Image (tube, rainbow, N blue to C red):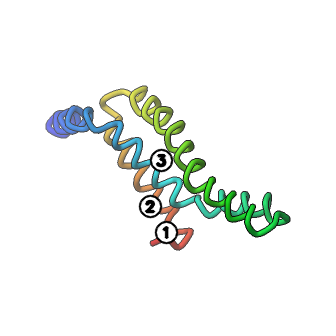
Amino acid sequence: MFILDLNLRFAHFLQPYLQDISLALVATCLVVYGDKVNGFIKSLVSSWVFFARVVAFILMCTFGYGLLTLWSQPLVYWGITRVDLMYRPALILFCFCLLGVLAERKRHL
């Protein structure tokens, strides 16, 4: 009973920070997989002239990643809020651990 009570208290403690947590999850995913996105853009614009490639890269880094963050953060937040309060802390911990393992596999750590 003590562990369940502690889990519920932790879930209530996390409640006001769920938007920040979802933003951190999205940002971490973009950091871990940003090289894949950059590689895809690079393959699309590799035949363009130098100036156009530079402009495309700048636009992708400024607006592309910003839009990805802006559009995916509410989806992650929605997904987290759909999980029962009892399982929410475990889900958040699992997601961050999974991202840590994925970052380790990609040699980001």
The secondary element bearing badge 1 is classed as: helix
Q: CA distance from mark 3 to mark 1?
A: 17 Å
Q: Are marks 3 and 2 in contact (CB under 8 Å)?
A: no
- Report the amino acid beneath label 3: Val
The secondary element bearing badge 3 is classed as: helix
For disc 2, the marked residue is: 100
Local packing at callout 1 (Cα closer than 10 Å; few below 14, some 14-19, many 20+) is: few
Q: CA distance from mark 1 to mark 2?
A: 6 Å
- Spot occupied by residue 107 in the image (x, y as percentages of width and height): 53, 73
Residue 26 tag number: 3
Q: Are marks 1 and 2 in contact (CB under 8 Å)?
A: yes
User: Which sits earlier in the primary sequence, circle 3 or circle 2?
Assistant: 3
Side of 14 relative to 92 (left or right): left
Task: Single out the mark in the foreground, 3 or 1.
Answer: 3
- Report the amino acid beneath label 1: Glu
Quarter assignment of residue 16: top left
Q: Residue, x 60% and y 48% (percent of image)?
A: 64
For disc 1, the marked residue is: 104
Q: Name the residue nearer the viewer: 31 or 54.
A: 54
- Report the amino acid beneath label 2: Gly
- Spot occupied by residue 15 in the image (x, y as percentages of width and height): 26, 33
Side of 61 relative to 104 (left or right): right
Q: Are marks 3 and 1 in contact (CB under 8 Å)?
A: no
Most distant residue in the front direction: 51
- Spot occupied by residue 100 in the image (x, y as percentages of width and height): 44, 61
Local packing at callout 2 (Cα closer than 10 Å; few below 14, some 14-19, many 20+) is: some
Q: Name the residue nearer the viewer: 84 or 12.
A: 12
Which quarter of the rendered picture does the C terminus lie within?
A: bottom left
